[in-house]
Image (cartoon, rainbow, N blue to C red):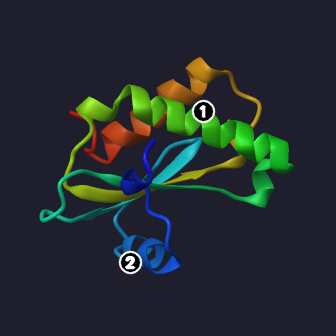
Amino acid sequence: MRKSYRVKKEADFQKVFNQHNSFANRMFIIYKMEKPSQPHFRVGVSVGKRVGKAHDRVHVKRRIRQTLLEYKPQLAQDYDFLVIARPAARDQSMEVVRENLVHALKLADLLK
């Protein structure tokens, strides 16, 4: 995913996080903030140390980014959102991660 689609700065993360507009399931927490003036969505991915060692966290991040890339045309375009992985996402297959992330995105009303 291109850099223009990512929330990278700590200040931007905090703005979205402080909106307290969160949705969660067993594997993911999604925070969202509406930004109607921007041309496309931006996403921040966070996988904490509780998920596992560095290679486990990178593995989970890659699966999250791949799922978001697959569903990119169906995502709401006027939002910034954060995807935070819970420890349950560590040892799951791609299909399980995809199902749970899509479920969380639907809960957050980000997926058409």
Circle 2 residues within 10 Å: few <14, some 14–19, many ≥20: few
Q: Quadrant of residue 70?
A: top left
Q: Residue at x 79, y 59 (%)?
A: 49
Quarter of the figure that contains the C terminus: top left
State the mark number for residue 15.
2
Q: Residue at x 83, y 50 (%)?
A: 54
| Residue type, mark 1 in image | Arg
Label 2 element class:
helix
State the mark number for residue 3.
none
Instruction: Give residue 59's position: percent from left, percent from top.
Output: 72, 36
From the viewer's perspective, is residue 46 above or below residue 101? Answer: below
Q: Residue at x 60, y 32 (%)?
A: 63
Q: Quadrant of residue 17?
A: bottom left
| Residue type, mark 2 in image | Lys
Instruction: Give residue 94's position: percent from left, percent from top.
Output: 61, 22
Give the labeled residue for mark 1: 63
- Left or right: residue 68 versus residue 39 is right
Instruction: Give residue 19's position: percent from left, percent from top.
Output: 34, 74
Label 1 element class:
helix
Q: Residue at x 35, y 55 (%)?
A: 42
- Left or right: residue 101 versus residue 108 is right
Farthest right residue? 53
Circle 1 residues within 10 Å: few <14, some 14–19, many ≥20: some
